Image (cartoon, rainbow, N blue to C red):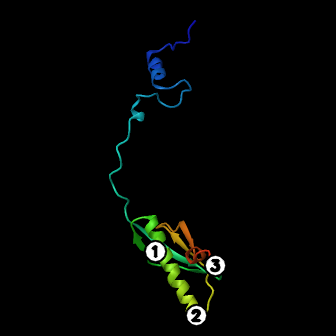
Amino acid sequence: MGKAPKHPSQRDDLKRWDDEGGAPRTGHPSHEPHPPATHEAEPALFYFNVRTETGVIEDPEGDIHSSLQAAREAARAKARALIAEGDQRGEDRRSWRVEIMDRANQPVLTVAFSEVLGPAASS
């Protein structure tokens, strides 16, 4: 006896799904190429908290940036400015870091001040 399904709807199911019962076969609508995304990323609000040796300096307002990469560049600029300020005061801020937070106050990226200084300055 064959293993053919008893009901026509079961035969149709077998035509749509592969032998393992998983992914659809070629030609199934889910295998159609998706149109390329035409929309740009929406600007997002990021907060730039500064983690020091003794605590956190929170950014209460945040800034809007077009992408996480743009926010990272802003964090690097902030780190450079704080390093320069620390140098004027005779403070070593190499262990500090900027924690980039999203609107929900979740960390999305950290920029270490030592990363901004480069390998020659951190030794």
| Type of the residue with mark 1 | Ala
Q: Residue at (55%, 84%) from the top-left corner? A: 83
Q: Residue at (40%, 69%) from the top-left corner? A: 65
> Residue 70, relative to residue 50: is it above or below?
above
Q: Earlier in the sequence, mark 1 or mark 3?
A: 1
| Type of the residue with mark 3 | Ser
The numbered mark at residue 89 is 2
Res. 47 in view: yes
- Screen quadrant of the N terminus: top right
Q: Residue furthest top?
A: 1
| Left or right of residue 43, residue 81 in this image | right
- Screen quadrant of the C terminus: bottom right
Q: Residue furthest bottom?
A: 89
- The quarter of the picture where residue 95 lies is bottom right
| Type of the residue with mark 2 | Arg
Mark 2–mark 3 distance (CA, rounded to whole Å): 18 Å
Q: Secondary structure at mark 3?
A: loop
Mark 1–mark 2 distance (CA, rounded to whole Å): 23 Å
Q: Which is nearer the eye, 25 or 1?
A: 25
Q: Earlier in the sequence, mark 1 or mark 2?
A: 1
Q: Residues within 10 Å of mark 2 (few under 14, many from 20)?
A: few
The numbered mark at residue 122 is 3
- Return the x and y of residue 107 as percentages of the image width and height: 54, 67
- Return the x and y of residue 15 as percentages of the image width and height: 46, 21
Check whether the beta carbons of the residues at disc 2 and disc 3 lie within 8 A of each other: no
Mark 1–mark 3 distance (CA, rounded to whole Å): 21 Å
Which residue bears the numbered disc 1? 74
- Return the x and y of residue 14 as percentages of the image width and height: 49, 21
Q: Secondary structure at mark 1?
A: helix
- Return the x and y of residue 35 as percentages of the image width and height: 34, 43
Q: Secondary structure at mark 2?
A: helix
Q: Residue furthest left?
A: 38
